[in-house]
Image (tube, rainbow, N blue to C red):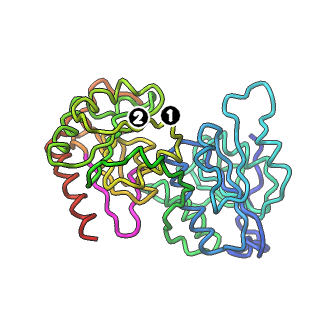
Amino acid sequence: MRAVPNTEHEPTLPGAAALVRGGRVLVVRLSALGDVLFALETVAALARERPDVAIDFLVEDRFAALLEDHPQIDRLLVYPRKQRFAIPRSLLALRARRYDVVLDLHGIVKSAMHVAVARGRLKVGAEAPGSREGAQLVYHRAVVMGQPLPHRADLGHRLLGSLGLSGVPCAAVLAVVPPPAELLAKLPRPLVLLHPGTSTFATFKRWPVDRFAELARRLASRGFGVAVSFGPGEADLAAPVLAAAPAARAIDGSRLGLRGLAGVMQQCDVVVAADTGPLHIAAAVGVRCVALFGPKDPARYGPRGHGGIVHEVLYHDVPCRPCKLRDCVSPQCVLGIDVDTVEAAVLRQVAAGERR
């Protein structure tokens, strides 16, 4: 990777001077789903403090649909993740505009490649270990994050702080697609949505399906409305949960799309899910969450609460957590969470919502 000379000392771009009136900023966060949602906090904070600035966003193709029609994004650039043996269209598109500031919220070699190509007066990202794989070599300004590293969403706020903005967190905005009226019709309240799946990459984070089924049975017996959401290839995972509460409603995320799933979640009172993208969609649209977290550190990866909402993050405390493993033969941090604990958390969140 070609290194751009570090110009942290540049006298012509001190702080907010980089953000000229009517200027343009590029935000880079390619993946994953939760991190893209965290990056939308940065977009919202920038739009709040500098409504005169146009914001472009670069994201991988598999998450681009989530950002379509976003009211705070002027132009959406899409990185075709699987395009090989050719110059990605996203790299070519970056040469079409000049940017006053380029913010790299990803901080890996793949994002740094785009930052290096972008025509930006000031390129800003996190200093290692907030960035990895040498990504900081292409930044003009590498911002020290300190130890322990902040929440992934707060990384973007600190980058904004280095530009002279307040750095105060701001709730993400989503262009939600409302669900068909009949999808949630006649379901009783409170309405709790259960999401038993995770990505196939993170199956070891899953709470056992039989416990989701028992939770669904208990909630239904209390007179609660129950919905069960699932993504592509997860219908079999949702089936036992739906069978345990015959009146429960199936929410097929593969048909609704991410923004449609967000629309469904927005109409629920509580969402119960593992550490997975849909959990963060629920948090982004302001729904109370019960997060079954397991191996990851919630201080860095937990669901974000805004507007007075405090989510519940559950895990079984074992000596090896939090950890950075990509797989585990016996994830006791998740398996040790019992149904009684989750049910009690749901009831607390329902009560908290009713008091507002």
Q: Is residue 212 above or below residue 288?
A: above
Q: Which quarter of the image is occupied by the N terminus? A: top right
Name the one closer to the observer, 165 or 352: 352
> Label 1 vs label 2: CA separation?
8 Å
The circle drawn on residue 230 is 2
Residue range of the region highlighted in magenta in the rendering: 301-314
In screen coordinates, is 48 left or right of 25? left
Read off the residue under disc 1: 254
Residue 22 rendering spot, x and y as whole percentages: 78, 72
Cβ–Cβ under 8 Å for marks 1 and 2 = yes
Q: Residue at x 22, y 39 (%)?
A: 216
Which sits earlier in the primary sequence, circle 1 or circle 2?
A: 2
Left or right of residue 267: residue 108: right
Q: Quick check: 77 left or right of 250?
A: right
Q: Is residue 305 magenta?
A: yes
* Above or below 345: residue 84: above
Residue nearest the viewer, comparing 57 with 10: 57
Main SS class of the magenta portion in the image? loop
Which amino acid does the dot numbered 1 rest on? Answer: Ser
Q: Using the image, tell me which numbered label, if any, was put on residue 281.
A: none
Secondary structure at badge 2 equals: strand
